């Protein structure tokens, strides 16, 4: 069993890595061009836009999409998709209505009035992201990881081409915003073509009673996962919002570039390994706790072995790398990257396995309190930095150290849950 499970997981990870790796390489190679077409202030506005969108994304499907891979009944699966689409459409209309009449008030709350002329991009990004999320989890259910990999490549290519072409024609920050939207939701036609026949057959089984069953059966997902996701996204967005408010859009742009570059390997690990791991343990079922415990331990050790050397290089030579690759105006971004690598090492080890563990064992309440602790730690670190007048670099240091401790505690909690289940 161990060999078979490991082989399946390894093959699925390779499929996802091939797509995410190519897509990330496209984004990485295009970065020097894009950074010369747009200013740090433009990247600051993009970071603000992304942060606001990320805060909205948990409401796309109310996290019911997480339930799509779990149920063994095919008819319940297609009704799970229908339930997610229904929730997405309703919430898109609600968000669009709110922003249509109150966009200035909403954006001023986030100190983002500079995005006021782009308010209608938010519901568009919201809907497209939601559809992509639903179809992605539908692919995980049937382990169609090659489809996910292909879509990932298309998304990155379309996003990069949009940013470069619109930058060359001097569209300004509009190019960054549209490119960002397409980089997260492009390639939907590939998903639709792949599952069109399955959807045509399955539509006959979509019933209101079964949709209601899904919404009731998995009510813990919106009850705990939405607050958890909001807390997680808030913790991730706070540094961007704090830097914009306290240090200006220039420093925010520097931070945004560092995050986007360092997130390449982290995103590959969290997304690719996480999806393959979730698909594998969902197929095993929570009854096979010992196998899941053993698989989790092996995956974490391998992830640490993979990431430790690259991030140590960033820690030692981050400033020099950013100076020579992106240009002298991005040296501060390299300094940020050095210190942020301290916590991103542990995030890379923890995040790929955490989502699957909490979903399969239905520990949504524990996850909620874990995210409460993460947000509390982030808020406290930024509050200390503000009260003591820390410089921009000192703020990044205390923020990174705080998150490093939090991720270490999270890893311990994952193994505590698995031990308790056994």
Image (tube, rainbow, N blue to C red):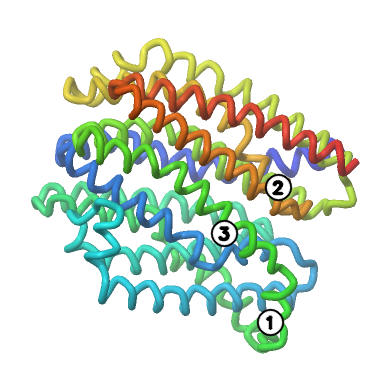
Pick whichever of labels 1 and 2 is earlier in the sequence: 1
Secondary structure of the residue carrying tag 1 is: helix
Estimate how packed mark 2 is, as few (under 14), some (14 to 19) or many (20 or more) residues with alpha carbons within 10 Å. Answer: some
Up-down relation of residue 219 to residue 90 (above or below): above
Tag 2 residue: 366
Label 3's element? helix
What residue is shown at x 41% (from left), y 60% (from top)?
185
Residue 411, located in which quarter of the rendered image?
top right
Quarter of the rendering occupied by the N terminus: top right
Looking at the picture, how far across and down is residue 210, in whole percent?
Answer: 72, 83
- Under tag 2, what secondary structure? helix
Q: In the image, which disc is placed on residue 226?
A: 3
* CA distance separating discs 2 and 3: 13 Å
- Residue 99, quarter of picture: bottom left
Cα–Cα span, label 1 and label 3? 19 Å
As measured in the structure, the alpha-carbon distance from the residue carrying label 1 to the one carrying label 2 is 26 Å
Q: Residue furthest front?
A: 387
Comparing marks 1 and 2, which lies closer to the viewer? 2
- The one nearer the camera, 396 or 197, is 396
Can you tell which mark lies on residue 212?
1
Question: Could you tell me if residue 138 is visible in this image?
Answer: no
For this view, does 136 lie left or right of residue 318? right
Residue 372 appears in the rendering:
yes
List x then y, in percent, for residue 388: 34, 22
């Amino acid at each position: 069993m161990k060999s078979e499970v490991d082989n399946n997981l390894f093959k699925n990870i390779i499929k996802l890595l091939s797509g995410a790796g190519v897509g990330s390489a496209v984004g990485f190679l295009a970065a020097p061009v894009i950074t010369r077409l747009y200013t740090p202030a433009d990247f600051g506005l993009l970071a603000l836009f992304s942060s606001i969108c990320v805060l909205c994304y948990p409401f796309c499907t109310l996290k019911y999409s997480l339930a799509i891979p779990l149920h063994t009944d095919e008819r319940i699966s297609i009704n799970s998709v229908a339930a997610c689409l229904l929730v997405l459409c309703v919430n898109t209309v609600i968000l669009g209505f709110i922003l249509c009449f109150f966009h200035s008030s909403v954006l001023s709350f986030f100190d983002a009035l500079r995005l006021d002329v782009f308010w209608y991009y938010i519901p568009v990004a919201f809907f497209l992201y939601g559809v992509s999320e639903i179809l992605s989890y539908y692919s995980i259910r049937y382990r169609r990881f090659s489809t996910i990999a292909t879509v990932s490549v298309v998304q990155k290519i379309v996003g990069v081409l949009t940013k470069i072409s619109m930058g060359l024609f001097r569209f300004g920050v509009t190019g960054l915003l549209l490119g960002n939207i397409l980089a997260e939701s492009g390639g939907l036609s590939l998903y639709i073509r792949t599952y069109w026949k399955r959807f045509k057959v399955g539509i006959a089984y979509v019933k209101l009673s079964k949709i209601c069953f899904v919404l009731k059966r998995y009510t813990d997902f919106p009850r705990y996962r939405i607050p958890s996701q909001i807390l997680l996204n808030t913790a991730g967005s706070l540094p961007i919002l704090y830097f914009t408010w306290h240090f200006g859009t220039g420093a925010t742009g520097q931070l945004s570039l560092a995050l986007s570059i360092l997130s390449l390997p982290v995103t590959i690990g969290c997304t690719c390994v996480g999806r393959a791991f979730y698909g594998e343990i969902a197929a095993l079922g929570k009854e096979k706790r010992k196998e899941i415990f053993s698989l989790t331990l092996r995956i974490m050790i391998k992830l640490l072995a993979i990431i430790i050397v690259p991030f140590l290089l960033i820690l030692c030579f981050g400033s020099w790398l950013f100076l020579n690759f992106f240009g002298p105006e991005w040296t501060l971004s390299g300094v940020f990257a050095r210190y942020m690598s301290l916590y991103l090492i542990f995030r890379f080890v923890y995040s790929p396995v955490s989502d699957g563990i909490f979903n399969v064992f239905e520990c949504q309440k524990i996850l909620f309190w874990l995210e409460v602790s993460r947000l509390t730690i982030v808020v406290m670190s930024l509050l200390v930095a503000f009260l003591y007048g820390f410089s921009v670099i000192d703020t990044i240091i205390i923020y990174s150290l705080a998150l490093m401790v939090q991720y270490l505690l999270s890893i311990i909690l994952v193994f505590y849950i698995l031990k308790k289940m056994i």
